[in-house]
Image (cartoon, rainbow, N blue to C red):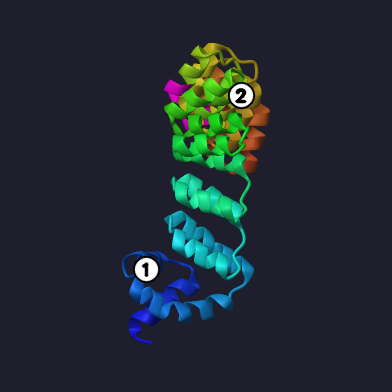
């Protein structure tokens, strides 16, 4: 073997970076066929876990021929192949994974929504996916309005999932749209925004009306969001001892000092 052979094989065998092999199989098929027997020999020595790791990398690259190659030599995690291809938007790889036996179409729907691939969302539904609420959550979290609209058409009763996903993702506009569509779970909205540190969405949730501000003060203290702690206190949260204890356990010194000011006043 020449140096290029060794280089490609070393990259393949270490599974740290398969760009070279993936590109080679697509752009220089003659040379790829020449060294394929050597690659086969290497691949046969890998564990099943290693083979599946490589299959997933091929799926992420959208390389159909190398996905087939990995299956030929024993890789069998076709559901994960499906999920990764769905997130990256590779429809042909999704179809191949289904042909191989993948059947986790709900997770395909979830990942397609997260990636913003509405055509793949529709395909997953066509294949039997039913968890529209997860499609809504992921689309709202990642800010994909068109997919949120599709989910809303399919199930009008999942707008609270949209509200929670948008709150976690920090999307003010989608939060407001979810409320327009009828979402009312403002406690959950505040919880997701508090954990993620989205100040403006916390303000919005408080404007809508919530009942869990003391619990959320604990969440903010645990996550280290001092500005949100201050906001919640302004709105009536007063469990300063819990705020202090939780912040201390989480190692947030600034919040401990902030809580101590209120404890001293009491």
Please tell me the numbered disc located at residue 188.
2
Residue 251 occupies quadrant: top right
Residue 205 visible here? yes
Query: Real-space Cα distance between discs 2 and 1?
Result: 46 Å
Q: Name the spot of residue 94 as percent of width and height, x first.
A: 51, 49
Query: Horizontal placement of 22 versus 196: left or right?
Result: left
Q: Name the spot of residue 63 as percent of width and height, x first.
A: 43, 59
Rendered view: 168 above or below 213: below
Q: Secondary structure at mark 1?
A: helix
Q: Which residues are magenta?
A: 167-174
Q: Is residue 173 one of those drawn in magenta?
A: yes
What residue do we see at 52% from left, 24% from top? 230
The quarter in which the N terminus is drawn is bottom left
Q: Name the spot of residue 181 as percent of width and height, x first.
A: 52, 14
What residue do we see at 46% from left, 40% from top? 115
What residue do we see at 61% from left, 26% from top? 216
Residue 258 visible here? no
Residue linked to disc 1: 20
- Disc with the residue nearer the chain's start (2 vs 1): 1
Q: Secondary structure at mark 2?
A: helix
Q: Name the spot of residue 142 as percent of width and height, x first.
A: 46, 34
What residue do we see at 46% from left, 55% from top? 60
- The prevailing secondary structure element of the residues shown in magenta is helix
Residue 184 occupies quadrant: top right
Residue found farthest to the left: 27
Query: Horizontal placement of 147 versus 157: left or right?
Result: left
């Amino acid at each position: 073997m020449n140096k290029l052979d060794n280089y490609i094989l070393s990259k393949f065998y270490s599974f740290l970076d398969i760009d070279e092999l993936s590109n080679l199989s697509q752009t220089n098929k003659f040379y790829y066929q020449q060294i394929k027997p050597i690659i086969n020999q290497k691949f046969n020595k890998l564990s099943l876990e290693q083979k599946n790791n490589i299959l997933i990398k091929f799926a992420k690259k959208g390389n159909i021929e190398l996905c087939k190659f990995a299956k030929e030599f024993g890789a069998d995690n076709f559901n994960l192949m499906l999920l990764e291809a769905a997130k990256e938007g590779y429809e042909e790889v999704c179809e191949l994974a289904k042909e191989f036996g993948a059947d986790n179409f709900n997770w395909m729907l979830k990942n397609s929504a997260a990636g913003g691939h509405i055509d793949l969302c529709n395909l997953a539904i066509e294949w039997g996916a039913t968890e529209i609420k997860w499609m809504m959550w992921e689309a709202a979290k990642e800010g994909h309005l068109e997919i949120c609209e599709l989910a809303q058409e399919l199930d009008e009763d999942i707008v609270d999932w949209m509200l929670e996903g948008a709150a976690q993702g920090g999307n003010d506009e989608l939060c407001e749209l979810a409320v327009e569509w009828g979402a009312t779970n403002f406690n959950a909205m505040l919880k997701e925004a508090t954990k993620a540190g989205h100040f403006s969405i916390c303000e919005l949730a408080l404007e809508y009306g919530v009942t869990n501000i003391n619990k959320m003060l604990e969440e903010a203290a645990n996550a280290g969001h001092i500005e949100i702690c201050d906001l919640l206190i302004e709105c009536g949260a007063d469990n300063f001892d819990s705020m202090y204890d939780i912040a201390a356990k989480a190692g947030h010194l600034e919040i401990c000092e902030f809580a101590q000011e209120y404890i001293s006043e009491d």
